[in-house]
Amino acid sequence: MKMKKFVSAFLASAVALSLVAGCGGGDKKKAEEKKPAAAGAVKVGVFLPLTGDNAAGGELELRGIKLANKLHPEINGKKIELVIADNKSDKAEAANVAARLIEKDKVKVILGTYGSSLAMAAGNIVKDSKVPAIGTSCTNPQVTKGNDYYFRACFIDPFQGTVMANYAFKKGAKKVAIVQEVSNDYSVGLAKFFKEAFEKLAGAGSVVEIANYQTGDKDFSAQLTNLKAKNPDAIFAPGNFTESALLIKQARQLGIKAPFLGGDTWETQDFVNVGSKEVDGVAFSSAFDSTKAATPEAKKFLEAYAKEYKGEQPGGLTALAYDSYLIALNAMQKAGVDDSVKIREAIAATKDLETTTGKTTLNADGDPIKSAVIKTVKDGKFSFIDMVNPEDLKAK
Amino acid sequence: MNNKRNIMLTIAALVILFGVACFVQAEVNSYVRRIINLCLVYAIIGLSMNVTNGFAGQFSLGQAGFMAIGAYMVGIFTVPVELRADVFYAVPMNPHLVNVYMPLWMALILGGVLAAFVAGIIGTPVLRLRGDYLAIATLGFSEIIRIVITNATSITNGALGIKNIPPLNDVRYIFMAAAISYVLITLLLNSSYGRAFKAIREDEIAAEAMGISLFYHKNLAFMVSAFFAGIGGGLYGALLGTVDPKNFLFTLTYNFLLIIVLGGMGSVTGSMFGAIIVTAGLEYLRLFDEPMELMGIAIPLFRPGLRMVVFSILLMVCVLFWRRGIMGTNELTWEKIISFVKHPLSGFRKKGVQGK
């Protein structure tokens, strides 16, 4: 009995000791490694969800940033070093990691993140410590609003909703229905601005039905039966790709013929896999079209991506992450690399910068004004239908 | 005699720690402060969960829901009135609430009281269940709270969440809240109520035979636990400066379950240690996420996510060797600390001495 206790205590302390020793060694190594880097390199913080619920999105974006770093590794003769940190798809971790990048790693600019709530958790920190951050795919307007230090490379929910409303109106829809995923901020935001824009175009009462569902729902027959009675010309249903694909499938089974419109979350192979034939002919907005390079930079990006990840097509997330790096790079070329407040000014002044998704200009809120692509699914493949520029929306 | 000495020592320790908190607030960078704050907030919530799970022996998994109530009270009432239109851009805020502003402490207490109230309503039917069934029912209720919050758009801004909560990264404030929670919970647990909780934990039938009202005491434990979870949740919201319903998925509860199981079910000081180990430890392990070079060659294993693997292994080691958590149902008492100081070797099993 006593022997057993002794053995277990001994083993436990051995494990603890080896751990401490291991970590200690690691620290020393790191210190050695950091010294030469600190002498010349410019540090850029990358904070993304690399584990947890959003890890898939985070990983795609990390590819974009790494690729951009590979193609543009230097600035004014100094090497750019990425400090990659994982925010675990968790808000508390996101706040910790943003503070860590700023206080411990002393980065001058931060790139990231996927997921608006994670970006909002970091918002106060970048604002207080005056280090600019460029969001990759956080589309909620609240991220940049009232925060001078948060910018982003993606377009925001209002713009996407407006684009799709205009598209629906152009295609002759007179009355539309909205099906929103009520527990998803992205879906709620798109739906709200779609409704506003469409009612402006087609008059009050043109949105005949707003139905709600929850993330993870599998059965939509109640919402769809209601919706069928209203007989809309088109249905706007932004949301997660799995739920959306199931929704469209069930709508077709119920005999609803109206076309479905959605947002950029649909641009994933899984959407087609779940929805199979039924999702043919849907239309959705996206930031990036991999079949047609919009700019020389996009061409460079596509070539490099094809070389690095053989046989894969880059999606919108990867392109946006690549763009966020370009925005930071451009700003640092103008403002130098020492003063983060100056870098912030330069980012805010970004105008007509050539990125993979067209020319990028940031507005007063720090959101980009850029064109959106409208895509469809044809025989299980994504294909390009139309391009919508911000000017087109104003003209109407 | 000893009792009096212990009280004096505890007060002295709290005063000294408060001094340390003031020093930390003034001298240490915001990253470290944030970690310390998170430890303290998690300690409050861990403690609250320990009241039902560890002391009253009722396996409840509703903590995330009660935290959500507290966090949303802070979110709804402490955002400056002029910034609210920015937040509620999709659906305007309820006209009865839009001009109601509260200071943080008031919103925290309101959140705690409301959480306790909801717990009272839930607890009345649910606490008749035992074991796994109780866990499932409370888990369900915590999800219901979250879904109500998601759908009450004009009050909570639904899925879009609330931001612009004045950020609170003040170690002194959160330390005071943690200290008050600690003192109140310890006093409760050392009273006749606390002994009744423990009696129920050990054997419900025997406890009832001794004249302890099961219904009353279980409900009391559940409500006290929800009250402090509400306060902890409010501080969590204030620390992050934003809340949204996805924060309070049922997986959040497992964080605190981990803390109390690691610290020891039924140990107040254990919950404190658990919170510190889980929060600060996970942050310390971040060095495994960074690329590491050994003799000029980058080790491919060192990539983001490795720390979670290491952490899991450490947890398994802990569970294997300390089957009842680090502290079990024991407390770190002044007697033990004093005997450790007098004879360091005899207290072989006691680790880290912290004045609390």
Image (cartoon, coloured by chain):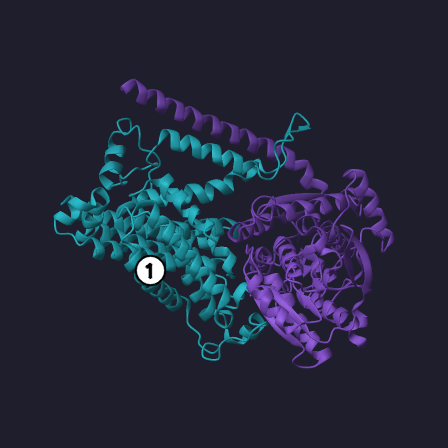
Chain colours: A purple, B cyan
- Residue A261, horizontal then vertical, whole percent: 71, 63
Q: Nearer the viewer, residue A335 or B128?
A: B128
Task: Report the residue at 42% width, 72% height from top.
Answer: B102
Query: For this rendering, which residue is in front, B75 or A173?
Result: A173
For this orientation, the residue located farthest to the bottom is: A204
Relative image position of residue A171 (x, y in whole percent): 79, 70
User: Is B52 left or right of A291, judged from the image as shown?
Assistant: left
Specify whether residue B162 is in view.
no
Position of A35 relative to B38 (above/below): above
**Quadrant including the N terminus of chain B:** top left
Q: Quadrant of residue A395?
A: bottom right
The residue that mark 1 highlights is B122
Q: Which chain is home to disc 1? A: B
Toward the right, the furthest residue is: A296
Placement of A261 over or under A41, stated as above or below: below
Element at label 1? helix
Quick check: A121 left or right of A360? left
Left or right for B192, reference A22: left
Quarter holding residue A202: bottom right
> From where the camera sits, is residue B244 visible?
yes
Measured along the vertical axis of the image, is residue B341 above or below residue A330? Answer: above
Which residue is found at the position 51% from the left and 43% from the top?
Answer: B283
Q: Amino acid at mark 1?
A: Ile
Q: Nearer the viewer, residue A312 or B165?
A: A312
